[in-house]
């Protein structure tokens, strides 16, 4: 049954209740008396508000469920149970060793690396007069748009982090894309490692997204988004004659494993792409064993899409020679990037 039909039935039923009460000399309750306020239009009662909330929630969900979220492509989802989570465990762990003598225990490093959750909200006010006058035609699409906005927000957060990685510090105290991260060489000696190609143009990124449990970025989920309808006596109605239909959630996004991502702003060509692949692959654990990182996905914005497709999909390069980089990575084109 459509929303307006349900509300009409509620309105008629409420009138019958009031009429019977008056006929038998009874005084209607405050809730029943409220129907008289809306006589000739939409009736503002707890029942009509509940029916209205159902319709608005359905529209919200229609918009929410229409969004194909993509942030999971580059971010690992971490369930959160507190106001913040610690990430001291994001350190290099040595590889397997022959068991000779006692075990070598790899303890989690004590660290202040922490990501705090944030609370997010989106609210739409519906004037009480519009409810009474049954002027609700615009609200179905409006709440569908609200659902889409709320559903897309994690994408906004996660993808929005990438361009900021050149000037924002990660959990190791360096910029996420930096020239002097601490790493190791084949002999296990500590060395400086770069995951950036510099430049000043549109950014592009080569990433290892082949692990389900490890990604370059983090989406930390404390409380999923929920639609929250008002009550008939909410303070907003008393003060502003407005019913507030809100959605809220609690989560945050942050930088994760810099070892899995390379970022640059130089022109995207075969030379720069090769340098990125070499850098990602040239990482070793403290015991000298390879980290096994490889560039599985090339992430670009619309301005670099043509160059990226030429690199990864063309049979031959610009000079007519065989394109050796064809099919070496999958392409992700993100509208959040330039």
Image (spheres, rainbow, N blue to C red):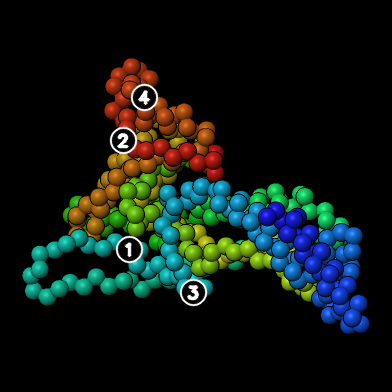
Give the mark nearest the N terminus, 2 or 3: 3
Give the mark nearest the N terminus, 4 or 2: 4
Check contact, mark 4 vs mark 2: CB within 8 A: no
In the rendered image, residue 99, in percent from the top left (x then y), is placed at 10, 68
Q: Nearer the viewer, mark 1 or mark 4?
A: 4
Check contact, mark 2 vs mark 3: CB within 8 A: no
Packing grade of label 2 (10 A; few <14, some 14-19, many >=20) is some
- Quarter of the image with the C terminus is top right
Q: Nearer the viewer, mark 3 or mark 1?
A: 3
Instruction: Give the Cα separation between the discs numbered 4 and 3.
Output: 49 Å
What residue is disc 3 on? 82
Residue 175, located in which quarter of the rendered image? bottom left
Give the mark nearest the N terminus, 1 or 4: 1
Give the residue displayed 33% in from the left and 71% down from the top.
109
Q: Nearer the viewer, mark 1 or mark 2?
A: 2
Count of all numbered marks drawn on residues in the image = 4
Residue farthest to the bottom, as pictured: 26
Residue farthest to the top, as pictured: 320
What residue is disc 1 on? 91
Packing grade of label 3 (10 A; few <14, some 14-19, many >=20) is few
In the rendered image, residue 191, in percent from the top left (x then y), is placed at 28, 54
Left or right of residue 244: residue 326: left
- Quarter of the image with the N terminus is bottom right
Instruction: Give the Cα separation between the discs numbered 2 and 3.
Output: 41 Å
Nearer the observer, 287 or 38: 38
One can see residue 128 in this view: no
One can see residue 87 in this view: yes
Circle 2 SS class: loop
Give the mark nearest the N terminus, 4 or 3: 3
What residue is disc 4 on? 314
In the rendered image, residue 73, in percent from the top left (x then y), is placed at 42, 49
Nearer the observer, 240 or 13: 13
């Amino acid at each position: 049954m459509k929303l307006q039909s349900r509300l009409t039935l509620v309105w008629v039923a409420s009138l019958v209740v009031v009429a019977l009460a008056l006929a038998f000399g009874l005084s209607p309750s405050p809730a029943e008396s409220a129907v008289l306020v809306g006589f000739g239009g939409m009736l503002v009662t707890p029942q009509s508000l509940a029916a209205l909330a159902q319709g608005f929630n359905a529209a919200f969900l229609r918009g929410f469920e229409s969004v194909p979220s993509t942030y999971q492509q580059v971010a690992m989802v971490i369930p959160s149970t507190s106001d913040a989570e610690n990430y001291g465990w994001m350190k290099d762990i040595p590889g397997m060793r022959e068991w000779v003598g006692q075990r070598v225990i790899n303890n989690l490093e004590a660290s202040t690396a922490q990501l705090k959750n944030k609370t997010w909200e989106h609210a739409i006010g519906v004037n009480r007069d519009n409810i009474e006058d049954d002027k609700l035609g615009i609200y179905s699409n409006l709440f569908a748009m609200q659902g889409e906005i709320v559903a897309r927000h994690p994408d906004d957060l996660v993808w929005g982090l990438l361009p900021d990685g050149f000037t924002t510090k990660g959990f190791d105290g360096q910029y996420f894309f930096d020239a002097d991260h601490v790493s190791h060489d084949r002999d296990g000696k500590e060395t400086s490692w770069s995951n950036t190609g510099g430049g000043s143009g549109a950014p592009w990124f080569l990433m290892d997204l082949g692990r389900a449990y490890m990604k370059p970025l983090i989406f930390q989920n404390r409380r999923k988004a929920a639609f929250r309808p008002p009550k008939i006596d909410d303070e907003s109605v008393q003060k502003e004659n407005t019913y507030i239909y809100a959605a809220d959630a609690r989560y945050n996004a942050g930088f994760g494993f810099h070892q899995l991502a390379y970022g640059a702003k130089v022109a995207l060509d075969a030379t720069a792409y090769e340098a990125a692949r070499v850098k990602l692959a040239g990482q070793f654990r403290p015991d000298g064993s390879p980290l096994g990182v490889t560039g599985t996905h090339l992430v670009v914005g619309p301005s670099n899409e043509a160059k990226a497709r030429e690199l990864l999909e063309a049979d031959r390069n610009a000079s007519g020679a065989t394109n050796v980089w064809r099919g070496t990575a999958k392409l992700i084109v993100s509208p959040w990037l330039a």
